[in-house]
Amino acid sequence: MARERILIADGDADTAQIAEYEHDRRELIRRGLGLGGAVVAAASSIPLLLSVRNAFAASSGDVEILQSAITLEGIAVLAYGVAINSGLLSGDFTKVARRFRDHEQEHADALTTALTDLGGTPPAKPEIKDIDGVVKGIGTLKSQGDVANFAIELEMAAVAAYYEAHRKLTDAKLLQAGASIMANEAQHLVVLRQTVKRAAVPNAFETGEQ
Amino acid sequence: MDVDSFLRDPLSRRRFFRMSGVSVAGGSAVFLAACGDDTKSPTASLGPDESDEADVEILNSALDLELMAVAAYKAGAAKLTGSALRAGKLFLEQEQEHADGLASAIKDAGGKPNRAKAAYDFPELSSQTDVLRFAVDLENTAIAAYIDALPKLGKGDLRATAAAIVANEAEHVAVLLGALGEQQVPDAFVVGKAA
């Protein structure tokens, strides 16, 4: 079940290949394995993140969902940090990546406050190697387009996780915070998709699925 | 009225949304400082039938907004050209998809979907910039309304769908702001603007 992330060159995307990849990914999610079965075997240091979607879907309570979300936001902060320091980005795109990293940090901070208010314990800080638990291959990026496509996958995973969380969360203010964060990730997607000339708003319902 | 006065004057905005049949409780979209207090979903204590009735009312308010957005994008299209026109057409279709989805959900819950008004009293849209700014305002109003309504929805599937619609409206805002030459993602938390 070796599953490679598909990098899409600026402009031309192999739609058949993407469709196949998406089909596989949906199949996995349906079977409850979530993003990348290989990740499970790789024994991430963060068991909650065996699968982002699965972790959210299987979480029984608000505290557990918050812990997963904080880890996910922390991973996004790290991934944008890697991107910013990669030397692959233009000046303009570096500004965008910094802005988005700050947003992810704001999400993590607000969620951590909410978690401690609920009496929960913040999860361990993720490490660079944990990025692989959400989207694989951050070490292999070779161009700004690669970085943007990687970030698109990461943001899609986050949107999908928050989408699933809306079935489970019970606290009214958490539901609202979750939606406002999910909407912000969706706006990130617009800018990233425009960077690589992909359709900016491909679906009327942004669920994090292609 | 021109768009400038409309956007500047909260009273005329409120009157407009009320006249257009949009009854949205405003204000509660501002929540972040209180994130995590002990407010629980008010639907928790309702039986299934009451929950369905409450959902129908909320979904019909959302449907009113979507139908108005469809009408607004139709009215505005004449002033749009190029990529702004393409975006306007796409967003019109997507608002219609939301409206269709809400109408089915209302029927599933045993309710009767509201219909579009025969006419909407939109402010005067005399340029592409006017249309884009008015569209940003409508999208933000819808976002605030959905976020306000989210915790009141009794079914998990409906809450997830509402969140997916909020995310899509937020994407529209990012594209529209870009077309206006403004910062596309101004805030880490997208809360919209209460009617």
Image (cartoon, coloured by chain):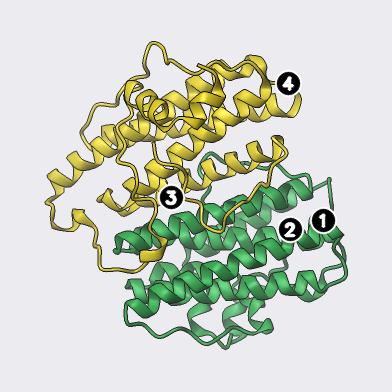
Chain colours: A green, B yellow
In three-dimensional space, the C-alpha distance between marks 4 and 3, rounded to whole angstroms, equals 31 Å
Identify the residue at horizontal 34%, vertical 30% (top origin): B103
Q: Nearer the viewer, residue A138 or B61?
A: B61
Neighbours of disc 2 within 10 Å: few (<14), some (14-19), many (20+): some
Question: What number is the disc on residue A179?
Answer: none
Q: Is residue B161 left or right of residue B149?
A: right
**Residue that badge 2 annotates:** A96
Percent position (x, y) of residue A136?
Answer: 70, 72
Q: Nearer the viewer, residue B179 or A169?
A: B179
Dot 4: what SS?
Answer: loop
Neighbours of disc 4 within 10 Å: few (<14), some (14-19), many (20+): few
In three-dimensional space, the C-alpha distance between marks 3 and 2, rounded to whole angstroms, equals 25 Å
Percent position (x, y) of residue A42?
Answer: 62, 85
Q: Amino acid at mark 4?
A: Thr
In this view of the protein, can residue A2 be seen by the observer? no
Question: What number is the disc on residue A92?
Answer: 1
In three-dimensional space, the C-alpha distance between marks 4 and 1, rounded to whole angstroms, equals 27 Å
Q: Amino acid at mark 2?
A: Val
Disc 3 with disc 2 on a shared chain: no
Q: Chain of mark 4?
A: B
Neighbours of disc 3 within 10 Å: few (<14), some (14-19), many (20+): many
Residues tagged 3 and 1 counted as in contact (Cβ below 8 A): no
Q: Chain of mark 1?
A: A
Q: Amino acid at mark 3?
A: Ala
Q: Chain of mark 3?
A: B
**Residue that badge 3 annotates:** B163
Quick check: B62 above or below A186? above
Q: Is residue B64 left or right of residue B177?
A: left
* Residue depth check, mark 3 versus mark 2: number of the one nearer the observer: 2
Quarter in which the N terminus of chain A is drawn: bottom right
**Residue that badge 4 annotates:** B81
